[in-house]
Amino acid sequence: MSDTRTGFPGVGISSPWIARPGWDLSLVLLTPLLALPLLLIWRERRGDFAVHEAVMAFGALGHHFPGMLRAYGDRALFARFRTRFLLAPLFLALVCAGFQLAGLHGLAVIALGWGIWHGWMQTFGFARIYDAKRRSYARTTARIDFALCAAWFLAPVVLSSQRSLQVLEALAASGLPLPSAAAIDALRSGAWFALASTALLYVAWSWRETRAGRAPSALKHVLLVSTFALWWISTNLVPSLIFGLALFEICHDVQYLAIVWAFNRRRAESAPACGPVTRFLFRGGALGAGLYLGLVLGYGALGPLAKQVGDAEMRQALAGLVLASQLLHFYFDGFLWKVREAPTREALGVSGDGSGARSERRGAKHLALWTLFALPVVGLGARELALERSAADAAAIVAASLPEDAEAQTRAGLAHARAGRPEEALPALRRAHALEPGANFRRSDLARTLGEAADAQLTRRDTSAARATLEEARALEPQFEALLELLAHARASSGEIDAASRSLAALDLLRPDPRWRLARASLLANAGRLGEALQEVRRVRASDPSHLGAIELERQLQARAAGR
């Protein structure tokens, strides 16, 4: 059966494909096989950060545009949901901008959870479309598919050290309590069970349905395997979190843009109520496709442009609007593309299942759903404002929940060091080094912070503690003395006399040498502190009365003092 109006020859209600074989395979089913090598090449040339920034802007933000286009370009749809389309953007823009300007993190927690749900539901939606193409409408099949998607999207996050750390950091920054280390271990055991049990249930049920002559779509199986494999790779196998996020995001975006194009191509040809903008943009051909992608990329460019604004407050407000676009995208997608709707089924080439469309939640019911969003937002904001948890305290709470995670320990230690508390940073950094003794950057972080701790100890004249700390740093970093000497020069050049003096004192503790005291004397003399400088010279002469350098410097200092 063929429906020539669709613009996809050979595809009709009886076809197992959403569009056509090549289209589905490259842009929906096997997209990860194409995206992974391309992103790896891009990564080799530009690095993780450049790949992540480009994908998050032109892909993650850009793919919000088609939903906005349908919401505000489809006259019939706009008339049906006018209140939602007018009030939701205003509400989200105000809330998101307010949270950004106030420096609150609660919406980041909501966006993170909603984003995982969004990817999970897109995959579930594709699975149901492919089954509908096979006239497989059994509710049990749908429920098993839903459970499988839930397990295979959530469990990899729980099992991933990087993603677990990301989630816990967001929760801690928002002032929320975190699970204990024992609870996280139990949760991870449950995640493994969920992965295995849902996979076995899915295979057993698919086999049962096939034996009964109701075989689920083979294309659905391909979709689920490729998507779950990609999600596992991006969360648990890719060493860089930002590259893993970009990897999954680009495939998600391509799939989304592809199905929206296929959907709107059919709508443009068969549904006059879709509006003139949709009919023009999705009329087909290279020009239409190019314009479509150009508008997507243009919308995505708003993100990088917002970061270039000079005023800090305006930059924060614009970041809030970008976040509002993300949340609005999640919200709109919750009801714009429901397959139970007859126009949606027709545009996707899916036959009806006899159930009909359910009545849309309106008025009080929909408002009640909004309270499920609004109440946590208000609660998170109020709790964070009341708690005033510092970044260092939040990092320490995360480290306590993840005692075997070296990165969590490192972040906790460095957060304390940045807060001016290097001695409090040392236990976590020592723990991180013990967990990953072969990681050079863990060793360097610890050695550098030991130097900062020794500096603090010298400030309060705790010489014995400073000596032990410096010895530990030198054992970790063979070049530590040379780095200390460079630091002393840098501090002296910038006019930090006391700090430079402490660096020279640290060198003297590590390797006693008259030149460090004479260097301190010269430094103090140049700052006009002749009395302190003379004391340093006389200490050298007390241990070595014939030291020529000390004799000459003492003569010069005495002459300068007399000349006053």
Image: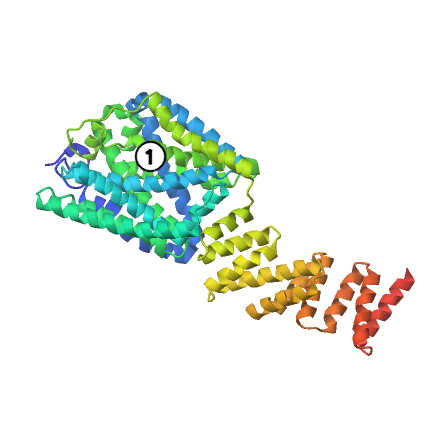
Q: Is residue 160 above or below residue 171?
A: below
Q: Residue at x 45, y 37 (%)?
A: 107
Front residue of this view, candidates 26 and 371 = 371
| Quadrant where the N terminus is found in the figure | top left
Callout 1 amino acid = Pro
Q: Is residue 373 left or right of residue 458?
A: left
Residue 92 sits in which quadrant? top left
Q: Position of residue 74 (x, y in %)?
A: 30, 26
For the residue pair 142 and 399, the one nearer the viewer reads as 399
Sort mark 1 into few (<14), some (14-19) or many (20+) by Cα contacts within 10 Å.
many
Name, please, the residue furthest toward the bottom. Answer: 546
Q: Residue extending furthest front? A: 182
Label 1, on which residue? Answer: 66
Q: Position of residue 111 (x, y in %)?
A: 41, 39
Where residue 252 sits: x, y (%)? 32, 44
Question: Height in image: 28 above or below 489?
Answer: above
Q: Residue at x 54, y 59 (%)?
A: 427
Q: Residue at x 55, y 49 (%)?
A: 392
Rendered location of residue 229, percent (x, y): 28, 52
Q: Is 174 displayed left or right of 451 in the figure?
A: left
User: In the picture shown, does residue 279 fall above or below 56?
Assistant: above
The kind of secondary structure element at disc 1 is helix
